[in-house]
Image: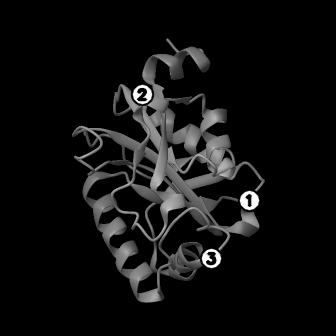
C-alpha cells in the first residue's frame, strides 16, 4: 500500500489521529466492554490492550494510516477508533486487500461519529492512496456495524463469506463472517466525484 496518506485527518466533528498514551484507558474500555465486544470472541486485559495499542501506534508511525484514534474536535475526547489497514489473512484474502473498520465506546453510539470518520477515511483511501477497493467484515448479526457499511454504500458479497480463522471453535456463533465491498468507482459515483 502507498504511504502518501498521513494522519491526522479532520472532519466537521472529528480528528482521526495516531494514539496517545492518554488514550489507553479508553482503548482498554472498548476492548473489554461486553456491549462493544458482543460480536468478538476476545476481551482484552489492560496489559493486552496496552500491547495492542503499542503495535497500532508503531504501525501508524511507520505507514501514516491504520486503526486510528478518533477524537471529538469540540472537547478533545477520544471516542474509539476508525481506520484502514492491510489485511494479513492469506487463507481468506489476497495480499493487498485493505479493510476499513471501527470500534467506539458505547456512550458515543448513535451520534454518527463512526459513519463520519469512515466516510472521510474511504475518501482518503480512494483519492490519496488510489486504492481500488475497501472491504469490511462482520458477523452478519452485528447490525450496528453493518448499518455503517450500508451508509457508506458498501455492498454485501455473500460469496465471500468465511469462517474467521482467529475465532475459536468454542464460539461457533461468531465464526461466520460476512464481507462487504466498496469499489472506488462506486464510491465516486455515490459521492459525485470525477
Q: Is residue 44 left or right of residue 151?
A: left
* Label of residue 109 in the image: 1
Q: Which residue is mark 2?
A: 127
Q: Residue at x 53, y 74 (%)?
A: 31
Is 26 placed left or right of 171 in the picture? right
Q: Does label 2 or label 3 sit earlier along the sequence?
A: 3
The answer to which image quadrant residue 110 occupies is: bottom right
Q: Identify the residue at image location x=52%, y=49%.
A: 138
Depth check, mark 3 against mark 1: the one in front is 3
Which of 194/183 is in front? 183
Q: Is residue 108 visible?
A: yes
Residue furthest top as drawn: 194
The residue that appears at 55% across and 39% down in the rendered structure is 120
Sequence-first tag of 1 and 2: 1
Query: Which mark is in front, 1 or 2?
Result: 1
Q: Residues within 10 Å of mark 1 (few under 14, many from 20)?
A: some
Quarter of the image where one finds residue 131: top left
Question: In the image, which disc is placed on residue 98?
Answer: none
Mark on residue 33? 3
Q: CA distance from mark 1 to mark 2?
A: 28 Å
Q: What is the C-alpha distance between the residues marked 3 and 1?
A: 13 Å
Q: Depth check: 141 or 128 in front?
A: 141
Does the residue at mark 2 contact the one at mark 3 (Cβ under 8 Å)?
no
Q: Return the x and y of residue 144 as percentages of the image width and height.
A: 68, 51
Q: Callout 3: 10 Å neighbours few (<14), some, many (20+)?
A: some
- For the residue labelled by badge 2, is the local secondary structure a helix, a strand or a loop? helix
Image vertical order of residue 106 relative to residue 141, above or below: below
Q: Is residue 69 something one can see in this rendering? A: no
- Looking at the image, how many numbered discs can be counted on the residues? 3
Q: Position of residue 172 (x, y in %)?
A: 49, 61
* 104 vs 93: above or below: below
Depth check: give the residue in front, 160 or 36. Answer: 160
Amino acid at each position: 500500500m502507498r504511504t502518501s496518506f498521513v494522519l491526522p485527518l479532520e472532519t466537521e466533528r472529528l480528528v482521526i489521529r495516531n494514539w496517545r498514551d492518554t488514550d489507553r484507558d479508553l482503548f482498554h474500555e472498548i476492548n473489554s466492554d461486553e456491549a462493544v465486544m458482543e460480536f468478538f470472541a476476545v476481551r482484552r486485559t489492560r496489559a493486552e490492550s496496552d500491547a495492542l495499542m503499542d503495535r497500532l501506534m508503531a504501525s501508524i508511525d511507520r505507514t501514516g494510516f491504520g486503526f486510528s484514534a478518533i477524537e471529538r474536535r469540540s472537547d478533545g475526547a477520544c471516542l474509539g477508533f476508525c481506520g484502514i489497514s492491510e489485511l494479513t489473512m492469506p487463507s481468506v484474502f489476497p495480499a493487498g486487500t485493505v479493510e476499513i473498520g471501527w470500534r467506539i465506546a458505547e456512550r458515543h453510539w448513535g451520534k454518527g461519529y463512526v459513519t463520519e470518520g469512515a466516510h472521510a477515511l474511504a475518501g482518503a483511501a480512494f483519492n490519496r492512496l488510489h486504492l481500488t477497493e475497501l472491504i469490511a467484515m462482520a458477523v452478519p448479526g452485528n447490525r450496528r456495524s453493518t448499518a455503517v457499511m450500508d451508509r457508506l454504500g458498501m455492498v454485501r458479497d455473500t460469496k465471500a463469506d468465511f469462517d474467521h480463522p482467529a475465532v475459536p471453535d468454542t464460539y461457533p456463533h461468531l465464526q461466520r463472517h460476512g464481507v462487504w465491498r466498496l469499489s472506488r468507482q462506486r464510491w465516486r459515483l455515490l459521492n459525485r466525484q470525477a
